[in-house]
Image (tube, helix red, strand yellow):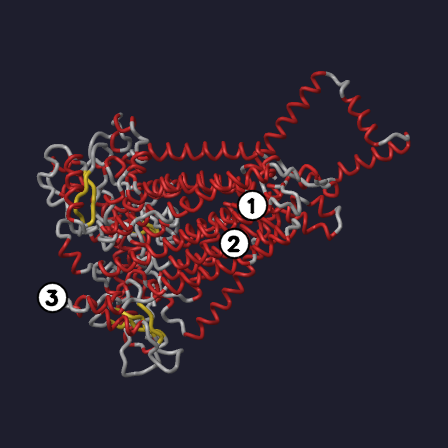
């Protein structure tokens, strides 16, 4: 187990790593050569151009402006003091509510109420005018146009260039003031009033829960635990000084347990109060969001599945898997053709050639342009034939359809009612956004869905069982002392002790006296040998501290890296039809896996290895008491994991190390055309299915150990506070210089917008953490001889379940149904050609002659006339096409 020295070593390593990552990010983001890594979203939207195309040769790759390096860490304080109400219009409600998980409970009604306040619009304009240099708004247009998205331009560049068309030639590596400017950034517009306010204040969720809990725990429980002095009196128990701060140090049957019981009630009531308040706020935000957002096709459309066969009905969903593969292959060949044409234009005296074999490594050498032209023509013919076959073949029609209505009211009634007396046919649900449809699963029959989900449930069980093997390895690293103490697993030590016992019997002296004699003889060795032994002993201590204080956390982190991808694949096999549902289901599996393996598995395996010697040398009746003493002491392992994953891990995310390395590798060896360069950029997104379960694990650890081992709470608070600063910066810092480094604005390219539909799952998982903490405390109390306290504690889980049912009945319907009252208020919209608006919204991408593009709402086109989105940039988006076009139905 980790001692104070081990945790100190681990903390030093992780803090140093976090500082290195932050400094590296602050410097790397200033370099023009990394511009596409830290600003991919702007390039994909066609608003930003490469800064490496102008200026001196060296300045194309390295920022030579020394002034920008003087304040290279300014983004940190600026991220914390930036007013939330200036964060407008980009991230979407999903991103916003995700950040609320960190900062649960901050008052945001004021922010929502002032969103449409003209006085605030005027004040923001004054702020921007004050921050700008003279003449920066000469041709800028109306800065207070809140209906549009916000891009950012250096004022000096804007005044010099005078138009947005010239922005692609701006040197973005330079520092200076930045100001908001209207731009079209896709249909995320108009969401940021809720998104950012929600996204940022969300991190306070955890802080508002855990900061008061930590204050009470350290003021009440820590003194009670420290003065217990029980661990020192128990024989054969492996512990460290830090374990004296846990409930394990309280004597069995002591009245001190009443302090833990009272604090358990206080912590539960406080957590429930914050959760209720947050649920109410987010429900109101969702209603406001649905009422004020721009028109979208999914508001008028219902997905109907398991439609009974009827030759008179024309269904619009086709099985186009093979056609999608042909389209993708044709795109690849076209990209190679463009590459060789560009190469030939640069050197017309030498015609490019290629080999027709595998990857162009062998085979007949032919003219590249002629070869790829012929291949493209051949594929075009196959594509036309396959397209006609899909449309004319009855077997290619799948039992699913997207049905669009003239009003939102009609769509709401259809989506939220049963259409037939047979509940297995005419299954209706709200259609996902067009770009969020997972086409590959629309053709799966209803019966097959049930079988698939059963098989995946069995597979998840065996996967969980399989992962117990690496968990046991991790706990072996974390419990070296417990293993060393057991003589049965240390043959050399066992033989040495046996020899000493035999010698003591022959000499008729006590074994302890014999050991004293041996120690006296050892004292007679030379000084040099003593020095060598001391150096070796110190070296062993340092290595052991590093192994116990750092390696267990990093080992667990490594074993969990590949897991989310496996779980996402399992969710796809289950047959869900939208990306948002896939991520929510994967998040549920990942949360269950972390709960069983990362939490319970580590506790059980760690306790067994930590007290291995005690378990093997005591009666079975004493084992429950040993477990009751040992479980609170496992907090030291989770402290090492929090430091690795929560401290250094969060700092590593902002650097985007993997996308940085992969972009430069692709740009050096694989990029042939501008399309390749755009595809080399990896904007990523807020991967809900990986990040939210990880946050829930921290919630679980904080709630469980808040009563039994409060020393873990400061490490969790540091994680949430650090995450608050980082994600606040990533989400909304487009103020002054820090506009150059926000991730959701400048980096993340969200795949969908569900309107915070995942919040009920988040709330339920926090409640699960509360109940688990109460049940574990109840079990610990029973092993510590506090039966009277245990009876009082039984009521706590019952009250928590009642609270969850109260919130579920009060708020959950907002997240699964659409109020008909709101649809009636917005049903009449003149000047809307609804048929033209919805005609091609849900046609498979391959039938559109290109990738699936987000249909621009009419409201957006009218409100954002200044800058047009570049189509080529959208086609290069990883999630605009790559996620959908290659998986057809």
Q: Which of pointers 3 and 1 lies earlier in the amino acid sequence?
A: 1
Instruction: Decide if residue 3 is in sight here.
Output: yes
Q: Is residue 36 above or below residue 581?
A: above
Q: Is residue 560 above or below residue 414?
A: above
Q: Nearer the viewer, residue 408 or 304?
A: 408
Q: Nearer the viewer, mark 1 or mark 2?
A: 1
Q: Is residue 835 above or below residue 766?
A: below
Q: Quickly name the residue at label 3.
A: 831
Badge 2 element: helix
Q: Which numbered circle lies on residue 726?
A: none
Badge 1 element: helix
Instruction: Decide if residue 2 is in sight here.
Output: no
Residue 59: name its quadrant: top left
Image position of 531 (left or right of 215): right
Q: Quickly name the residue at label 2.
A: 595
Q: Quickly name the residue at label 1.
A: 259
Image position of 98 (left or right of 458): left
Residue 852: name its quadrant: bottom left
Q: Are marks 3 and 2 in contact (CB under 8 Å)?
A: no
Q: Residue furthest left?
A: 138
């Amino acid at each position: 187990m980790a001692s104070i020295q081990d945790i100190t070593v681990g903390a030093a390593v992780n803090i140093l790593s976090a500082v290195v990552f932050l400094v590296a990010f602050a410097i790397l983001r200033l370099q023009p050569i990394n511009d596409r890594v830290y600003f991919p979203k702007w390039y994909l939207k066609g608003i930003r151009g490469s800064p490496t195309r102008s200026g001196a040769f060296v300045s194309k790759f390295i920022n030579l402006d020394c002034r920008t390096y003087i304040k290279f860490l300014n983004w940190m304080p600026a991220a914390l003091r930036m007013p939330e109400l200036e964060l407008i219009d980009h991230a979407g409600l999903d991103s916003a509510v995700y950040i609320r998980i960190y900062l649960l409970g901050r008052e945001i009604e004021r922010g929502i109420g002032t969103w449409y306040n003209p006085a605030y619009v005027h004040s923001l304009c004054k702020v921007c005018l004050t921050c700008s240099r003279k003449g920066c708004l000469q041709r800028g247009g109306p800065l207070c146009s809140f209906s549009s998205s916000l891009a950012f331009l250096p004022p000096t560049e804007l005044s010099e260039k005078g138009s947005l068309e010239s922005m692609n030639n701006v040197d973005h590596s330079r520092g200076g003031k930045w100001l908001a400017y209207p731009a079209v950034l896709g249909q995320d517009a108009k969401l940021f009033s809720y998104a950012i306010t929600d996204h940022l204040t969300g991190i306070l969720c955890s802080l508002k829960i855990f900061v008061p809990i930590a204050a009470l725990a350290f003021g009440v429980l820590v003194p009670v635990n420290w003065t217990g002095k029980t661990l020192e009196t128990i024989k054969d128990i492996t512990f460290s000084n830090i374990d004296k701060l846990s409930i394990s140090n309280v004597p069995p049957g002591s009245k001190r347990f009443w302090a833990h019981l009272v604090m358990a009630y206080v912590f539960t009531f406080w957590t429930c109060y914050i959760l209720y308040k947050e649920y109410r706020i987010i429900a109101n935000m969702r209603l406001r969001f649905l009422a004020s957002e721009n028109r979208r096709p999914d508001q008028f459309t219902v997905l109907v599945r398991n439609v009974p066969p009827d030759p008179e009905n024309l269904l619009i969903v086709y099985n186009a898997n093979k056609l999608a593969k042909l389209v993708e292959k044709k795109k690849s060949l076209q990209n190679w053709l463009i590459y060789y044409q560009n190469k030939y234009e640069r050197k017309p005296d030498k015609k490019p050639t290629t080999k027709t074999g595998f990857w162009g490594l062998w085979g007949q050498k032919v003219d590249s342009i002629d070869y790829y032209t012929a291949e493209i023509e051949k594929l075009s013919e196959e594509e036309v034939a396959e397209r006609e076959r899909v449309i004319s073949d009855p077997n290619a029609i799948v039992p699913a359809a997207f049905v669009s209505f003239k009003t939102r009211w009609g769509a709401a009634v259809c989506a939220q009612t049963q259409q037939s007396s047979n509940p297995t046919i005419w299954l209706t649900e709200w259609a996902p956004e067009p770009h969020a449809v997972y086409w590959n699963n629309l053709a799966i029959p209803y019966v097959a869905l049930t079988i698939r989900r059963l098989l995946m449930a069995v597979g998840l069980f065996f996967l969980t069982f399989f992962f117990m093997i690496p968990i046991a390895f991790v706990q072996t690293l974390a419990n070296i002392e417990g293993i060393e103490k057991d003589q049965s697993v240390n043959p050399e030590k066992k033989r040495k002790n046996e020899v000493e016992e035999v010698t003591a019997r022959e000499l008729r002296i006590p074994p302890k006296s014999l050991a004293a004699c041996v120690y006296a003889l050892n004292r007679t060795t030379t000084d040099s040998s003593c020095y060598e032994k001391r150096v070796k002993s110190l070296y062993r201590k340092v290595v052991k501290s590093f192994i116990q204080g750092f390696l267990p956390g990093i080992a667990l982190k490594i074993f969990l890296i590949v897991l989310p991808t496996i779980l996402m694949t399992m969710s796809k096999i289950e047959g869900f039809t939208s990306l948002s549902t896939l991520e929510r289901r994967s998040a549920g599996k990942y949360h269950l896996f972390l709960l069983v393996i990362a939490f319970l598995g580590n506790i059980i395996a760690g306790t067994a290895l930590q007290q291995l010697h005690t378990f093997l040398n005591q009666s079975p009746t004493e084992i429950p008491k040993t477990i009751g003493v040992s479980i609170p002491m496992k907090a030291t392992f989770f402290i090492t994991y929090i430091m690795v994953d929560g401290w250094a891990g969060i700092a590593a995310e902002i650097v985007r190390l993997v996308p940085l390395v992969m972009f430069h590798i692709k740009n050096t060896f694989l990029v042939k055309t501008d399309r390749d360069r755009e595809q080399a950029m990896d904007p990523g997104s807020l991967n809900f299915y990986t990040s939210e379960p990880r946050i829930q694990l921290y919630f679980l650890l904080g709630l469980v150990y808040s009563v039994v081992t409060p020393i873990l709470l400061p490490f969790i608070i540091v994680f949430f506070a650090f995450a608050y600063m980082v994600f606040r910066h990533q989400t909304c810092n487009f103020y002054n210089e820090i506009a150059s480094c926000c991730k959701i604005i400048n980096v993340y390219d969200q795949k969908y917008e569900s309107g915070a539909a995942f919040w009920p799952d988040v709330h339920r998982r926090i409640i699960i953490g509360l109940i688990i903490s109460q049940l574990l405390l109840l079990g610990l109390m029973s092993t510590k001889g506090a039966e009277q306290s245990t009876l009082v504690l039984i009521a706590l889980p019952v009250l928590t379940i009642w609270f969850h049912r109260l919130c579920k009945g009060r708020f959950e319907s907002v997240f699964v149904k659409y109020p008909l009252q709101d649809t009636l208020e917005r049903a009449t919209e003149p000047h809307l050609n609804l048929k033209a608006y919805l005609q091609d919204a849900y046609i498979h991408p391959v039938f559109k002659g290109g990738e699936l593009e987000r249909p621009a709402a009419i409201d957006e086109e009218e409100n954002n006339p200044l800058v047009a989105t570049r189509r080529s940039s959208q086609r290069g988006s990883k999630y605009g096409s790559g996620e959908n076009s290659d998986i057809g139905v």
